[in-house]
Amino acid sequence: SGLPPANIVLARGVGLTPHLEPFDAKRALKSACIVEVGLVKGIGRYLGMEVIDVPGATAGLDTDTEAIGRASRSS
C-alpha cells in the first residue's frame, strides 16, 4: 500500500493484571496518594489507595506544594 514498514510496536494495555493484595490490608495502614500523573494515580487506585486530587498540583515547577501539604494533613 506504499507505506514504510513498521519500526516499532506499541503494545499498550495488553497482558493480564496480576492479583495484588491491597496496600492497606498488607500493611495495616490507611493509605492515600497525592499525585498529578495519571499512570501513578492508576497504580494507587489498583493498590486500593485513596487518590486525592489537589487543585494546583501540576507536576511542574509551578505546582502548589502548600496545597499538597494541606491536603496530606486533612486526609
Image (cartoon, rainbow, N blue to C red):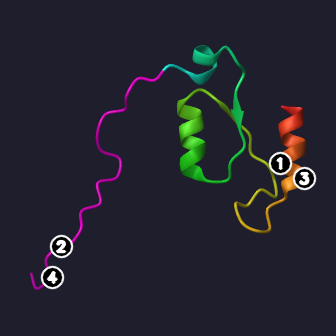
* Rendered image quadrant of residue 60: bottom right
Q: Please, is residue 50 above or below residue 24 in the view?
A: below
The earlier-in-sequence mark between 3 and 2 is 2
Amino acid residing under circle 4: Pro
Question: What residue does disc 2 label?
Answer: 6
Label 3, residues with CA under 10 Å away: few <14, some 14-19, many ≥20:
few
Amino acid type for the residue under numbered disc 3:
Glu
In the rendered image, the vertical position of residue 20 relative to residue 71, given as above or below: above
Q: Where is residue 57 in the image (x, y as percent from the top left)?
A: 77, 56
Q: Quadrant of residue 73?
A: top right
Residue 53 sits inside the magenta stretch: no
Element class at badge 3: helix
Real-space CA distance between mark 2 and mark 4, rounded to the nearest whole angstrom: 6 Å
Task: Tell me which residue sits at (80%, 68%) in the image.
Answer: 62
Q: What stretch is highlighted in magenta?
A: 1-20
Seen at 74% across and 45% down, the residue is 53
Answer yes or no: do the residues labelled 3 and 1 have beta carbons within 8 Å? yes
- Tell me the amino acid under the disc marked 2: Ala
Query: Label 3, label 1: how many angstroms apart (C-alpha)?
Result: 5 Å
Label 2, secondary structure: give it. loop
Which tag, 2 or 1, sits closer to the chain's start? Answer: 2
Q: Circle 4 is placed at which residue position?
A: 4
Mark 3–mark 2 Cα distance, whole angstroms, equals 47 Å
Looking at the image, which residue is at 83% across and 48% down?
A: 68
Q: Write down the residue under mark 3.
A: 66
Please provide percent x and percent y for residue 27: 63, 17
Using the image as rendered, state which of residue 27 and residue 42 is in the foreground.
27
* Residue 68 numbered tag: 1
